[in-house]
Amino acid sequence: MQFFDKKKRFVADDENFLALVQVLKEDSKIQSKIEPILSLDQFNRKSALNTWLEQLKYQQAPEKFIALLSCLIDDDIAKKLLSVIKE
């Protein structure tokens, strides 16, 4: 499956996107938390993500994981990841 972002490059080639897909394949607990968030409308998705990211920072979660989740603020990436999850 190939996805284009606004700059006409493949989103699926983005390292963070690919790493996040891998994390979701390996950890069903994280997938079960992310999928409902990605299903929200744009405003509520961003709000839920920002809240979760702040909690993770407070809990001193790994910075790489926080960076991976941060890419889901982007609408296009969030939509594409949701479609990958639902496949």
Image (spheres, rainbow, N blue to C red):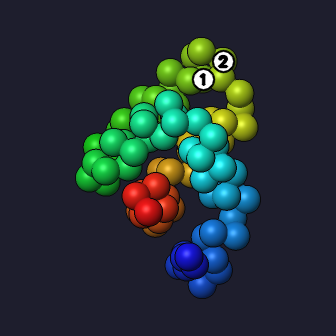
Q: Residue at x 36, y 36 (%)?
A: 48
Residue 47: percent from left, percent from top? 35, 39
- Rendered view: 48 above or below 8: above
Q: Residue at x 38, y 49 (%)?
A: 38
Q: Amino acid at mark 2?
A: Gln
Q: Does residue 17 appear to the left or right of 85 in the view shown?
A: right
Dot 1 and dot 2 residues touching (CB under 8 Å): yes
Q: Residue at x 60, y 23 (%)?
A: 57
Occupied quadrant, residue 33:
top left
C-alpha gap between disc 1 and disc 2? 5 Å
Query: Does residue 46 appear anywhere in the picture?
Result: no
Q: Does residue 67 appear to the left or right of 75 in the view shown?
A: right
- Rendered view: 18 above or below 34: below
Circle 1 residues within 10 Å: few <14, some 14–19, many ≥20: few
Pick the residue in front: 51 or 36. 36
- Rendered view: 1 above or below 38: below
Pick the residue in front: 73 or 17. 17
- For mark 2, give the secondary structure: loop
Quadrant (top left, top right, bottom left, bottom right) of the N terminus: bottom right
Query: Does residue 41 appear anywhere in the picture?
Result: yes
- For mark 1, give the secondary structure: helix
Q: Residue at x 46, y 55 (%)?
A: 85
Numbered label attached to residue 33: none
Residue at the top extreme?
59
Residue 60: percent from left, percent from top? 66, 18
Residue named by callout 1: 57
Q: Amino acid at mark 1?
A: Lys
Circle 2 residues within 10 Å: few <14, some 14–19, many ≥20: few
Numbered label attached to residue 60: 2
Q: Does residue 56 appear to the left or right of 33 in the view shown?
A: right
Residue 71: percent from left, percent from top? 57, 51
